[in-house]
Image (tube, grey):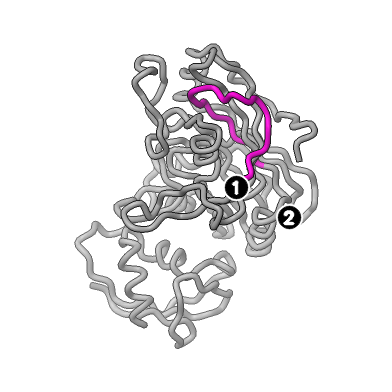
Amino acid sequence: MSGVKLQKVTEAHDGQRLDRWLKRELGRVPQSLIFKIIRTGQVRVDGKRAKPDQKLSEGQEVRVPPISTDLPEHKGLSDKDREFIKSLVIYDDGDLVALNKPGDIATQGGTNTFRHIDGLLEGLKTKKGVIPRLVHRLDKETSGVLLLARSAAAVRELGFMFKGKDIEKQYCALVSPAPEIYEGTINAPLLKMGGEMREGIRVNEDGQRAVTDYIVVDNAGKKAAMVVFRPQTGRTHQIRVHAAKVLGSPIIGDDKYGYDPEPFRGQLGTKRMHLHAFSLVFKHPLTKKPISIHAPLPADLKKSWKNFGFNEKMSTISFGAIK
C-alpha cells in the first residue's frame, strides 16, 4: 500500500477524463475500483469531490489515495508492447494519429480486460511527454481505423465532428445471407436493452435515431455478400443490428446478433466478426486540410475474402444518390 499522492495535471493530460487519467496513473487496477475511490470521495480535484467523467485542466491538483490490491505492480509497458502499438500506426501528422486496430484487442479497458489499446498509448509518447488520446472507439472484434489526437483542442473538435456528420466512416463486412436489396439506406431507431442483455441493442421506435447507408459490392450467390456500410449516426452496434435485424443478413462471426456458423466451416480465416473500419474521410480539426485514411484488411480477414473470391483491395465507394 502506498501513501496519498498529490499529482499535478500536466499539459499532456489537459482535457482528459479523471477516470482515464487515474487508470494511467494507477496501472493494472480494476475499473470498478477506480469508480469506487472516486464515488467515495477518496479522489479529490483541487480539494473537491469529483466525478469519473470530469475533464481535468492543466495545473489542477489531484489527490490519489493509497491503493492496495493483489494485482501485480504496474511497471510500465514492455518493449514488446511498445513495438506492437507502434506497428499499428498508419498515419501520423504530429497532431493526429491513426491506427489499424486488430480484431483481437479491446479499445478500452473494462471488467477483466487489462490489455487494451488505451493502455498501450504510452508507447506513442512524444519527446515532450505527450501521449495521444482516443477520440472514438471500435468494438473489440471490429478491426480498422482508430483515430487519436495529441492535444485537448483536437480531441474536443473531433468529438464534435464524430457526433455530427463531419466525418465520413466506411466499414466493409461479410454478411450472410446476401441482402435481397443491393443498395439503400436503413433508417431504424435503436434501443439499448436492460437486464441480462444490457449490452444488447434492438430496433425499437422508442430508441435513438440511427441511419446507415449500404451497398452490396459483391456476392457469392445467396450464401454471402461483401457489403460496404456508411453510418450517418454513431449508435452502439448500429451496423451490426441494422445488418441483422433490418437487412436480415447478420455479419459473419457476429454470434450476438444471429450469425449461424454451420454453413461456413473451413471457409473462414477467423471466427471473429467480419467487420472492418476501412476508411475515415474528414477535414483536419486544426488545419482544415482534407484527410483520407484507409486501413488495409488484416491477415485474418484476407483469408475469408479470398475464400469467397472477393477483392480485398477496397476503395471508397460512391454512394451516388443516397443521402
Q: Position of residue 301 (x, y in %)?
A: 48, 24
Residue 126 visible within the image: no
Label 1 SS: strand
Q: Residue at x 54, y 27 (%)?
A: 297
Mark 2 closeness class: few <14, some 14–19, many ≥20 residues within 10 Å:
many
Q: Position of residue 49 (x, y in %)?
A: 43, 84
Compared across the picture, whether 135 is left or right of 213 comes to: left
Position of residue 206 relative to residue 137, above or below, is below
Q: What is the magenta range?
A: 169-187
Decide which of 309, 18 is in the foreground and name it: 309
Residue type pointed to by label 2:
Pro
Compared across the picture, whether 17 is left or right of 265 comes to: right
Query: Disc 2 designates what residue?
Result: 285
Q: Which mark is residue 147?
A: 1
Q: Quadrant of residue 152?
A: bottom right
Which quadrant: the N terminus? bottom left
* C-alpha distance separating marks 2 and 1: 12 Å
**Mostly what secondary structure, the magenta segment?**
strand
Q: Residue at x 64, y 22 (%)?
A: 217
